[in-house]
Amino acid sequence: QVQLVESGGGLVQAGGSLRLSCASSTTITTFNFLAWYRQAPGRQRELVASITTTGDNTLYADSAKGRFSISVDRARDTVNLQMNSLKPDDTAVYYCKGVDYGAPSDYWGRGTQVTVSA
C-alpha cells in the first residue's frame, strides 16, 4: 500500500523558514504529480503548491508565490516544500498528496503541524 509521510513541521517565529518533506513508500515517479495542501482550524483544506514528478511544471497559490518553493527529489522519493518569510496566517496542518491517474483515488499523508508565532 502506498504511503506518504510528512515531516519537518514545527514552531517558528514570523519571518522564519521551514522545510517540509514528504516521503513516498513507492517510487515517486509512480505519481503524475504531487501537491502540498494545508488546513487551518475552522477553514477548508486549500492547495499550497503542486509539481509534476518530472519537475517541469509547478503551480502555487497566490499566498505562496514568492515565499514557498516546491521540489521533487527523485533520488530520495520525496517532495519538499521550502517555506520562507513565514507569517502567522501560514499556521496550519500541511498535507502531502500524490496523484496517480491510474489509481482509484488520490494518496494523502497524515499531515505535519506548522505553527508561526507573531
Image (tube, rainbow, N blue to C red):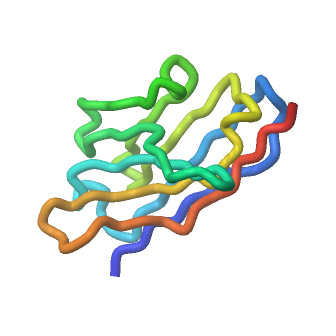
Image coordinates of residue 34 in percent, x first then y, are 34, 50
Q: Nearer the viewer, residue 111 or 46?
A: 46
Residue reaching furthest to the top: 66
- 10 relative to 79 in the view: left or right: right
How many marks can you see? 0
- 60 relative to 17 in the view: left or right: left
User: Where is 114 relative to 65, above or below?
Assistant: below
Query: Within the image, what quadrant is residue 98 found in?
Result: bottom left
Q: Nearer the viewer, residue 111 or 88?
A: 88
Residue reaching furthest to the front: 42
Residue located 52% across and 65% down the image: 5
User: Where is 16 relative to 90, above or below?
Assistant: above
- 117 relative to 21 in the view: left or right: right
Residue located 30% across and 65% down the image: 106
- 76 relative to 95 in the view: left or right: left
Image coordinates of residue 86 in percent, x first then y, are 70, 29
Residue located 43% across and 53% down the image: 78
- Which quadrant does the C terminus fall into? top right
